[in-house]
Image (tube, rainbow, N blue to C red):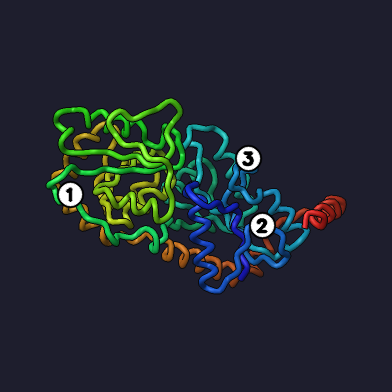
């Protein structure tokens, strides 16, 4: 099987979409499948659209590129759309409509959370050929080897990390925690470290700020702490809390977006009104939540297995799927596209 993943994979700290592509590519290759990140080959079996926005640095191709490939190169290729983005996450007003437009050329849709699928369905995207596959992190990197749970004889070390610097990543709560540390009630009980990019003109007063990290360096830094906090608003999935849970840290997580689907059995939920109350609760009941997270299941091997299963099922039903495709038969456009394609190759 040859799979094209529509992501320009970056090395070093980048973001959840980049990590997804790296992890899935690794899993597919390990299981004997060929993976490319463009549309140059004429024998692609599966195209996985991951980032169709041309303005994104991680975009390898758009849905228009895919449409032309189907029309003029290989009409027998199956198209899967991985949907992991929405307006609600960043406060924009154009992403959802764009993604629904992209989705029209997909034969199958994979959502990163039930919350995201429900959000799109309410806005008019009803696709019976879809499923939810939760994201996972690389267990070879993010694992609990070397993690030492809190012994209650020192300060409880709290950590979070984000590549994106949007305020909606949870900075209202991170700011509140930073201020709590200056309070006499908490000053001798907790400390907080933030790993990643910060919003413009924002600085912590009582917490540690660490530049973005990735891979083993990030995992090691996470494991220097005891408790993981995520307050990201309307996050469809997020990789940050997955990585922390696999490292052994119990989760203090906000009830927003798809995050509860990943965290609900492995930590304590809070909302914007009861953060300090829930912080206090997990502080005094830490051991109970730490034991739960030892059974955290969402890792990249499981995710890869689920994707591969769907790919096989789609290829088994390829003849039926191909009959439903609506392709462009404009001969002039075909000639122009193939001419440009030949030059670019």
Left or right: 325, with 183 as reference point: right
Q: Secondary structure at mark 2?
A: loop
**Residue 155, percent across and down?**
18, 42
Question: Mark 2 and mark 1: span between their CA atoms?
Answer: 47 Å
Left or right: 233, with 83 as reference point: left
**What residue do we see at 51% from left, 44% from top?**
85
Q: Quadrant of residue 38?
A: bottom right
Mark sitting earlier along the chain (2/3): 2
Mark sitting earlier along the chain (2/1): 2
Name the residue tied to disc 3: 55
Mark sitting earlier along the chain (1/3): 3
- The answer to whether residue 61 is seen in the rendering is yes
How many neighbours does mark 1 have within 10 angstroms: few (below 14), some (14-19), or many (20 or more)?
many
How many neighbours does mark 3 have within 10 angstroms: few (below 14), some (14-19), or many (20 or more)?
few
Name the residue tied to disc 2: 38
- The answer to whether residue 317 is seen in the rendering is no
Nearest the camera: 79 or 167?
167
Is the residue under label 1 in contact with that under label 2 (CB below 8 Å)?
A: no
**What residue do we see at 70% from left, 65% from top?**
76
**What residue do we see at 54% from left, 43% from top?**
124
Name the residue tied to disc 1: 286
Q: Quadrant of the N terminus?
A: bottom right
Nearest the camera: 219 or 335?
219
Q: Quadrant of the C terminus?
A: bottom right
Question: Mark 1 and mark 3: span between their CA atoms?
Answer: 44 Å
**Residue 172, percent across and down?**
34, 30
**Residue 90, percent across and down?**
48, 35
Residue 181, which numbered label? none
Question: Mark 2 and mark 3: span between their CA atoms?
Answer: 16 Å
Is residue 85 positioned above or below 149 on the image?
A: above
């Amino acid at each position: 099987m040859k799979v094209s993943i529509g992501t320009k994979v970056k090395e070093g700290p980048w973001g959840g979409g980049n990590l997804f592509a790296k992890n899935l590519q690794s899993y597919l290759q390990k299981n004997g499948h060929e993976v490319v990140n463009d549309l140059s080959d004429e024998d692609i079996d599966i195209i996985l659209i991951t980032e169709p926005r041309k303005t994104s640095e991680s975009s390898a191709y758009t849905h228009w590129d895919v449409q032309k490939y189907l029309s003029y190169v290989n009409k027998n290729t199956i198209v899967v759309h991985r949907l992991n983005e929405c307006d609600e996450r960043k406060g924009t007003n154009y992403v959802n409509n764009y993604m629904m437009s992209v989705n029209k050329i997909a034969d199958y849709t994979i959502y990163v959370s039930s919350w995201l699928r429900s959000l799109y369905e309410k806005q008019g995207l009803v696709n019976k050929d879809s499923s939810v596959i939760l994201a996972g992190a690389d267990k070879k990197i993010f694992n609990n080897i070397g993690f030492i749970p809190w012994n209650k004889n020192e300060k409880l070390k709290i950590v979070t990390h984000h590549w994106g610097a949007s305020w909606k990543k949870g900075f209202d709560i991170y700011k509140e925690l930073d201020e709590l540390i200056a309070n006499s009630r908490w000053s001798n009980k907790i400390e907080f470290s933030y790993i990643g990019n910060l919003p413009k003109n924002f600085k912590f007063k009582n917490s540690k700020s660490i530049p973005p990290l990735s891979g083993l360096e990030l995992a090691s830094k996470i494991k220097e702490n005891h408790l993981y906090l995520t307050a990201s608003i309307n996050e469809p999935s997020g990789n940050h809390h997955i990585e922390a849970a696999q490292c052994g840290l119990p989760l203090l997580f906000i009830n927003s977006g798809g995050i509860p689907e990943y965290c609900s059995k492995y930590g304590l939920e809070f909302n914007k009104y009861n953060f300090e109350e829930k912080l206090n609760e997990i502080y005094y009941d830490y051991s109970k939540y730490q034991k739960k997270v030892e059974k955290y299941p969402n890792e990249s091997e499981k995710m890869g297995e689920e994707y591969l299963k769907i790919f096989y099922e789609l290829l088994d039903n390829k003849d039926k799927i191909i009959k439903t495709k609506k392709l462009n038969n404009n001969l002039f456009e075909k000639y122009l596209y193939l001419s440009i394609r030949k030059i670019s190759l």
